[in-house]
Image (cartoon, rainbow, N blue to C red):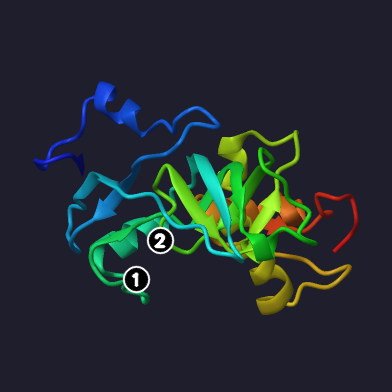
Amino acid sequence: HVTGVQTCALPISARRTLTPPPSGTTVIAMRVVSCPSFSDPVVLVVEERPPLVCGANQVRIEVTAAGVNYVDGLMAQGRYQIKPPLPFVLGSEVAGRVVEIGADAASGIGLSVGQRVAASVGFGGFATEVVAAPQQVMPVPDALSDGQAATFLQSYATAWFALRHRARAERGGCLQTRVSGAGSGHELRQPSRVVRAGGHHRRARTAAGDSL
């Protein structure tokens, strides 16, 4: 449940208040979805907080979309191996627009104010704005919507890491997956372009068109 004061779902009209302000607007307060305690069922609270300070080597991003992952549910229940201090703000991946670049981060990062970006932030993504180190931020191509970009990083990166660094997939090899319904399992089929054959998943070609 996402709650303002009580443990009940917010009406649609209240949820709309999480929409970020128009670009260029001075942010007096930011809104976050806070996890006040580990619980099952999960209870989250929408809060207003002072805006984050953008450090000299950081980038401030106006969040337009945030990925919701299985790990977020585990964290909110206290069942994940990482247990952040309470209360904390969920959300590890976001997409949005750059609204501020710190003085020390301005040179050599290839980012500009107003640019569409995605970022892997660890925590704090369920908010109207985040700050991140430049190495956590990457430009978003026009081919991806904000929603697609916000859900790309964690699952695809996990699938790619599993393929290249755990399974050590090599050219000409075959890939068999047991589960492909969740995020990383679904994405695992796309980098490797697996196809179902005879009850197994067999590797065909990568999304880029190159054989593994």
Query: Which secondary structure lies at badge 1?
Result: loop
State which tag comes first along the sequence, 2 or 1: 2
Q: Position of residue 143 (x, y in %)?
A: 75, 34
Residue at left 58%, top 43%? 99
Q: Is residue 105 left or right of residue 65?
A: right
- The residue wearing badge 2 is 71
The percent position of residue 21, horizontal first and vertical second, equals 44, 30
The amino acid type of the residue labelled 1 equals Tyr
Please indicate whether residue 45 sits to the left or right of residue 155 in the image: left
Residue 101: x %, y % from top left: 63, 53
Side of 111 relative to 125 (left or right): right
Q: Residues within 10 Å of mark 1 (few under 14, many from 20)?
A: few
The residue positioned 64% from the left and 70% from the top of the image is 162
Residue linked to disc 1 = 80
> Percent position (x, y) of residue 138?
69, 54
Question: Looking at the picture, does residue 17 appear above or below residue 117?
Answer: above
| Residue 200 in sight | no
- Mark 2 vs 1: CB contact within 8 A: yes
Depth order, front residue of 176/93: 93
Q: Is residue 169 above or below residue 89?
A: below
Q: Where, by quadrant of the figure, is residue 212 drawn?
A: bottom right
**Residue at the extreme left of the image, as rendered:** 6
Spatial CA distance of label 2 from label 1 is 7 Å
Q: Nearer the viewer, residue 176 or 23?
A: 23
